[in-house]
Image (cartoon, rainbow, N blue to C red):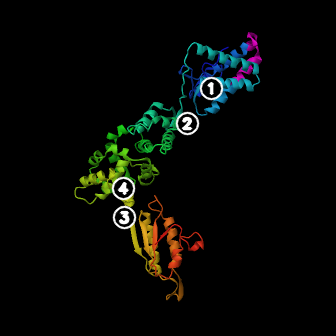
Amino acid sequence: MQTVSSSTAAAQPAPRTGTAQAGAAVSAYQGYQIIRRNGAVVSFEPNKIAVALMKAFLAVHGTQGAASASVRETVDGLTESVVRALLRSRPGGGTFHIEDVQDHVELGLMRGGHHEVARAYVLYRERRSQERAKQGVPAVAVEPSLMVTDRGQRVPLDMARLTTLVESACADLGADVKPDPILAETKRNLYDGVPIDEVHKAAILAARTLIEKDPGYTRATARLLLHTIRKEIIGEELLHAEMHTRYADYFPGFIKKGVQAELLDEKLMQYDLVKLGAALKADRDLQFDYLGLQTLYDRYFLHIEETRIEMPQAFYMRVAMGLALNEIDREARAIEFYEVLSTFDFMSSTPTLFNAGTQRSQLSSCYLTTVADDLDGIYEALKENALLSKFAGGLGNDWTNVRALGSHIKGTNGKSQGVVPFLKVVNDTAVAVNQGGKRKGAVCAYLESWHLDIEEFLELRKNTGDDRRRTHDMNTA
């Protein structure tokens, strides 16, 4: 008796006759491979499963059984079921270890009720295993070549490159930051046919879970995130060492793309983009920890239809260019601004980081207004709140001038409802109009302590009472 020496998975066993049919079968099995005990990877040959099964039956029933039509039909049926079971575990193609195939053969024999043949097959495998051990043949531990999906094509995962990526992320971070735990956890979270982008995300998540064990992993996680950002923006898998020349090549194209997408001010095209691109320092990407870089990616980097177009150093240079637009020597001033921003010696306010260099360069953080005591003034203040919040401005409104509850209204000969109903509208406006689409709107209402509505004003943030007179999303002072 012989065990299966090489096989793989397919929906049906290979046809035995017909050149066209055989060619179609080979084509159907091209996505499958087998890893042998010596580590060699061989192509799919489904007939070897049938040969191994036939030899198993011969070992039990003798050579006369080979002439039996029922035995041949049984072998064909078992081969088909084994191959189908293998296929279900790798529906889009992949690799199997030889031991996995033999396990499926055992299972197929037992499910088919051929217990005597199955027992002999198991004993034969055990005997061969002992013979290999006596001969000193080392068992080669070979990991299956995981198939990944890259640009719609199924390709083997390049474990060497993944290992290099993780090792470079951990380089120079101390002896306690090791790549092995990241690689091990990443492999555990992968599956056959996983998109290549998900492989990189798995590495980031694996590294992130280790931050609580050693803070040094926050830098390693940030470097892995940098790799995914580079791939998303540049379209290539680049290691950090390759970015020293690529930043200068990328930067002019980034500015042009941003202007064409109507995200950046056309005046940025008047800069010497080659000179500014040459001033970018790729090594400063390594200063980020994970949380800082993830925040920049989520909220600050420019994107077109959710695809980022802005690299970290390009982000700081874009802000610097926006600040230097009206300077005499713009390139020199922009580089000076870039130097202090990219080294974290100085950091501009959030609206400046959001909007500098864009078509609407609203750079201020906060706006304070006084609301007039008439409907035109009140709703003009609401409109201003919405427009300022739209471009990332924080808001403070003084409502002291607005008359209190029960005050006489000459124009209608009625009584005022006070400031609280209007503050409810202010609260809901801040919720509806967020800051540049990147964070919640921020507004604070002010009222002097002598105002007759001060008691109700102080209850605006309470969780009890009439919810129509509560403002849970707005600050008061």
Q: Quadrant of residue 116?
A: top right
Looking at numbered disc 4 in the image, what kind of residue is underneath it? Leu
- Location of mark 4 (residue): 264
Callout 4: few (<14), some (14-19), or many (20+) C-alpha neighbours within 10 Å?
many
Q: How far apart are marks 1 and 2 (CA)?
A: 18 Å
Image point (39%, 67%), residue name: 366
- Location of mark 2 (residue): 188
Q: Which of marks 4 and 2 is in front?
A: 2
* Mark sitting on residue 100: 1
1 lies above or below 315 = above
Looking at the image, is mark 4 or mark 3 earlier in the sequence?
4
Image point (60%, 28%), residue name: 28
Which segment is the magenta one?
60-79
Residue 13 appears in view: no
Looking at numbered disc 2 in the image, what kind of residue is underneath it? Arg
Callout 2: few (<14), some (14-19), or many (20+) C-alpha neighbours within 10 Å?
few
Q: How far apart are marks 4 and 2 (CA)?
A: 43 Å
Q: Nearer the viewer, mark 3 or mark 2?
A: 2
